[in-house]
Amino acid sequence: MRIGRKTKIILLTILLLVIFVLFAFVISNTQKECLSSDCKKTGNEPNILKLNDPNLFYAAKWWAGLCSNEKDEPGGCYSESYLYNDGKFEEIIGFVKYDGSPVAMTQPPIQKQLDAAELKRIKEIIENSGLMTKNCPAQEISDAGWDYQVTLNGKKISLHNPPLECRNVFDGISQLINSFASK
């Protein structure tokens, strides 16, 4: 029996779709390490002590599937950023194989010190954006994720996969932190 070209293309498309869905399932189950109470905890959340540090002002984490490391091993990438009230900033960048095992980072954690004026500017942006009271409900996303935690003026918020309008504010804050930290 001979299979036609259209049938081969359809079968190949279905096979690729199945592989993608399986990949998304594996990554989403190995990367459910979030800062928010909105997502299902797995018991292996990263840096839980950092998240409970009373001096922690800002924490951000993102992860994405479909990336590879310097050895071209497929898996997922992630980044965690922590900014403390004293201006200490730390960013951790990592990689996780499909089987969930971490791989040694290709670079050491980034550590910088922001001055009081830079920290004040970031806090003003958060206050002026309304993030502390804005409705930012979790969005269903299967191949990437974003988590944020902010403690400001005695109030703490934790967001998991916020909508784009909220995430854009956080992206701007991250860019500002990185521009300060790169000086």
Image: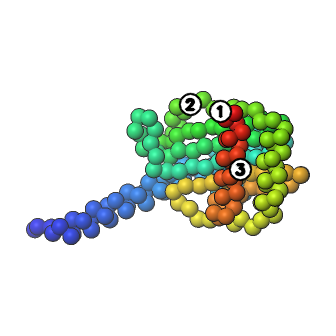
Q: Which residue is the extreme one toward the top?
A: 108
**Residue at (52% x, 31% y) in the render:** 106
What's the mark number on residue 173? 3
Marks 1 and 2 sit apart, C-alpha to C-alpha, by 8 Å
Image quadrant where residue 183 sits:
top right
> Residue 68 at what x, y percent from top left?
44, 42
User: Does residue 138 appear in the picture of this structure?
Assistant: no
Viewer-side label of 3, 2? 3
Most foreground residue, 171 or 83 = 171
Q: Which residue is the extreme one toward the left?
A: 1
**Residue at (84% x, 45% y) in the render:** 120
For disc 2, the marked residue is 107
Image quadrant where residue 140 sits:
bottom right
Asked if the residue at tag 2 contacts the one at tag 1, i.e. Cβ–Cβ closer than 8 Å, the answer is yes
> The residue under label 3 is which amino acid type?
Ile
Most foreground residue, 53 or 114 = 114
> Residue 121 at what x, y percent from top left?
80, 47
> The residue under label 2 is which amino acid type?
Gln
Asked if the residue at tag 2 contacts the one at tag 3, i.e. Cβ–Cβ closer than 8 Å, the answer is no
User: Does residue 116 appear in the picture of this structure?
Assistant: yes
Of the two numbered discs 3 and 2 on the same chain, state the one appearing first in sequence. Answer: 2
